[in-house]
Image (spheres, rainbow, N blue to C red):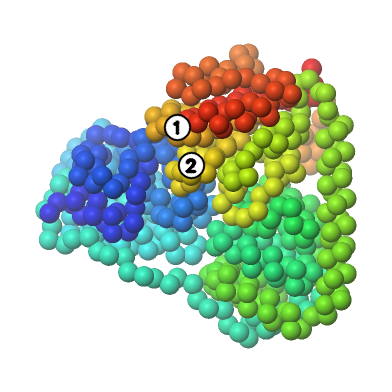
Amino acid sequence: MRGHTVFMDSLVANGVTHIFGNPGTTESPILDSLIDYPQIEYIMHLHEGVAVGAAGYYAQASGRTGVVSLHVAPGLGNALGMMYGALKAGSPLLVTAGQQDTRMRLHEPVLQHDLVAMAAPVTKWSAQVERADEMAPLLRRAFKIANEAPAGPVFLALPIDVMEQETEIGAEAPGVLFHQARADQGGIDALAEALAAAANPVIIAGDEVGFARAHKELVVLAEACGAGVFQETLRTHVALPSAHSHNRGIVPVDRAGIRHALEGCDVVLLLGATLFEEVWYDPVEAIPEQAKVLQIADYAGGLAKKLPADLAVAGGYVDTLARLTEAVTARIDAKVVAGRAAELAAARTARSEAAQARLAAVAGQTPMSAATALHEIAQALPDNVVVVDETITAIGDVVANISFEKPGDFFGARGGGIGQGIAGALGVKIANPDRPVVALSGDGSAMYSIQALWTAAHHELDMLFVILSNREYRVLKHNLDAYRQRFGVPSNKPYPHMDLSHPTLGFASMAEGMGVVARQITDPDELADAVRDAIAAGGPQLLDVVISGLEGPT
């Protein structure tokens, strides 16, 4: 058998049903093989970054390993930004790229480069298949490494001549691997003692909790010890129902802000290894000095990695949180817990009322505010909707208006690189063919991967793209304000090169040019009906919603 047969058989053996790719000449062995493997669907993209973005979100939404086929050095280069996002999100991916014939290595042929070195900084592991005999064992290792905690992308370069070599070594079945160790009972008891003795405990839940689908166990633990729960600002998943009274929202992206949010707590339980992606330097510690730091991570290398911990335990989140709840319940005063729960509920009500007041204050703005737009959109969303969000500066309005109950209802972007949202929404829809999918994106972010619209039309995906068009890089304006304040720069200057105007981006025209039904919305009274109509119509749809910028209404 030839190397490309072993490659395809290995994908089948590992349960792969989709390849996300952008075709090229060195990928001919894979493309030609697809005819003989009808159980694997090739999702075609017009840009390599979109392919990786879609595959990364598909992995998060489906629980399967995403597989990507890229084209040699320029194609891999185009994909590196999205590979970085997948690495930060912990998305299990097998990224491949065709390589030129190894017999031409000294000829320095067109498109050749050191692909392994290019991919290494943004992957867990990077290698090239040198002989067809290596194909099966390297693929087995690739799937294993991609899915071990911390999950993430791996890379294999596939020279075209190696794909055509003969080998006697066939695809290897992956076996059943239990990656997560059971947490030490002594460690769980010590965590329970600390939580039971706390006067004001707080939990900060990382993305890993949502990825592990440990949301139910987190709710029960939070209720058992009367703790408020924060989530990260940059996150892929929902770890706690957004309307739950113990949900205290998201932590800021600077240490001073995090410290302020945690003011008054005496015990902080960190769930995850990669918490806190900061934007600005602050010369203070994120955790107040009086607070004892506890941590649970699903692999030992994640313990006390980014922050020092007074007590840390490694173990799978579902099992560890369930056992910790049992241990805490046996030690804590139920009346104390009830009092904390009442305080958290009152604070939650106050935040909701404040959000309603802010919404009322911007009613009637022209153009409409982001808050108004999200409120109208929320009224029209069906109960089983999946929202993929990359609104960035409007994330507060998203979570204030749309209720997310569990992981799988919401997908956001990790790492800070923009353009992930509308690309990732493709993968979310492929993983959820029976649920409506709505992608919310800012206009600046959308332009990084606008080619995603063509893929949605090409594969006839039933999904809605909503572009909030404030016609500026609003997050950069916020960050420029922060920079000027933090570094003492005079702040009476305008915002340079941060407006998306002259010309104004025409998303409805762009969408229609790629086969997506589209319309522009400027009147908030039309927005809810437009969302309902678009979802009911089926196929890919786009709404270009004009909203106000940082300088306010015109």
Residue 52 in view (yes/no): yes
Residue drawn 64% across the image and 17% down it: 501
Q: CA distance from mark 1 to mark 2?
A: 9 Å
Q: Which residue is mark 2?
A: 429
Q: Is residue 425 left or right of residue 372?
A: left
Question: Which of disc 2 and disc 1 is earlier in sequence?
Answer: 2
Q: Quadrant of residue 273?
A: bottom right
Amino acid type assigned to the residue bearing label 1 in the image? Ala
Residue 456 is tagged as 1
Instruction: Find numbered disc 1 in the image and state the secondary structure of the residue it sits on.
Output: helix
Q: Residues within 10 Å of mark 2 (few under 14, many from 20)?
A: many
Residue 447 in view (yes/no): no
The image position of residue 34, as x and y in percent, is: 24, 42
The reply to whether dot 1 and dot 2 touch (C-beta < 8 Å) is: yes
Of the pair 361 and 86, the residue shown nearer to us: 361
The image position of residue 333, as x and y in percent, is: 83, 80
Number of labels in the image equals 2
Q: Is residue 61 left or right of residue 196?
A: left
